């Protein structure tokens, strides 16, 4: 059983029997989040999609406190090691895959800009395709729609897509993405945190139901879904 919890904005917690994985932890300055960095002392891994503040701001503190491994693009992994003395890092690049104790991680392209808070080189922004206990989970992270999403993520058990518009794709492009990816289930992300990315979530859910075959789930902050193991 894999438990997936929305921490608000684009921050996610993925828990398996033996591992606790954070994706893009943004808690202290996140007006939508109630979880605190100290809640994640037992986290084992932190995935960082890109260096923008709303994805990275609490990652170094949590990684230090928890002794968690940071997995990110090569340049960002080096930055965590050199600038934040994070001992365990995994630097990847687009298209690459690695087996980790909880499952496999593939770094997927994302059509988005990238930068680090101090101006250090940040490489490419990315998404992640996780395979955990036979379940395939696609976190698109911050991105526009691009047609190769379906090459990497066709038929995944769960797709987590940004829908807030302005900085990422919005509702109508997310529907297009769902039609091409054909996930079994879809969760929205990167919306509602601030007024510029407010959306009518009911409208999104109804559009997913009426225009695609995927099952939309909308979570309140700190709510979870469970994915059964399929092997
Ligand atoms: Ni961003
Ligand atoms: Mn963002």
Image (tube, grey):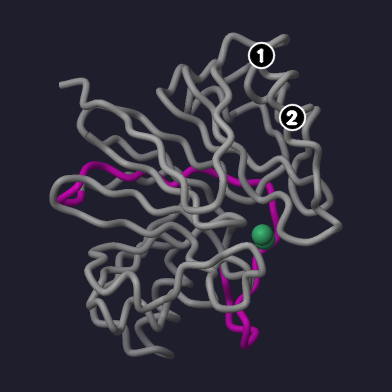
| In this rendering, the label closer to the viewer, 1 or 2 | 2
- Magenta-colored segment: predominant secondary structure: loop
Q: Name the N-terminal-most of marks 1 and 2.
A: 2
Q: Secondary structure at mark 2?
A: helix
Residue 220 appears in which quarter of the rendering?
top right
Q: Which residues are magenta?
A: 100-122
Q: Which residue is mark 1?
A: 209
Q: Is residue 3 left or right of residue 151?
A: left
Q: Is residue 9 left or right of residue 206?
A: left
Residue 187 in picture, x, y percent from top left: 55, 34
In the picture shown, does residue 147 fall above or below 14?
Answer: above
Residue 115 in picture, x, y percent from top left: 65, 72
Q: Is residue 111 left or right of residue 158?
A: right
Q: Which residue is mark 2?
A: 202
Q: Secondary structure at mark 1?
A: helix
Residue drawn at the location 62% of the way across and 17% of the way down: 180
């Amino acid at each position: 059983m894999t438990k997936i919890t929305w921490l608000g904005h684009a921050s996610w917690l993925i828990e398996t029997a033996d591992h606790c994985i954070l994706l893009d932890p943004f808690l202290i300055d996140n007006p939508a989040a109630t979880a605190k960095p100290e809640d994640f002392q037992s986290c084992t891994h932190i995935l960082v999609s890109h260096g923008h503040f709303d994805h990275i701001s609490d990652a170094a503190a949590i990684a230090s406190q928890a002794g968690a491994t940071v997995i990110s693009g090569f340049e960002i992994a080096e930055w965590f090691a050199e600038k934040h003395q994070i001992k365990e890092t995994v630097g990847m690049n687009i298209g690459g895959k690695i087996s980790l104790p909880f499952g496999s991680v593939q770094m997927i392209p994302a059509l988005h800009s990238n930068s680090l808070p101090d101006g250090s080189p940040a490489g490419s922004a990315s998404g992640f395709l996780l395979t955990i206990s036979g379940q395939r989970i696609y976190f698109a992270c911050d991105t526009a729609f691009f047609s190769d999403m379906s090459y990497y993520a066709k038929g995944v058990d769960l797709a987590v897509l940004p829908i807030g518009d302005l900085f990422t794709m919005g509702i109508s492009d997310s529907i297009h993405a769902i039609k091409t990816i054909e996930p079994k289930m879809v969760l929205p992300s990167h919306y509602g945190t601030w007024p510029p990315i407010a959306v009518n979530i009911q409208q999104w859910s109804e559009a997913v139901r009426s225009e695609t075959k995927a099952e939309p789930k909308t979570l309140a902050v700190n709510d979870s879904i469970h994915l059964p193991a399929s092997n």
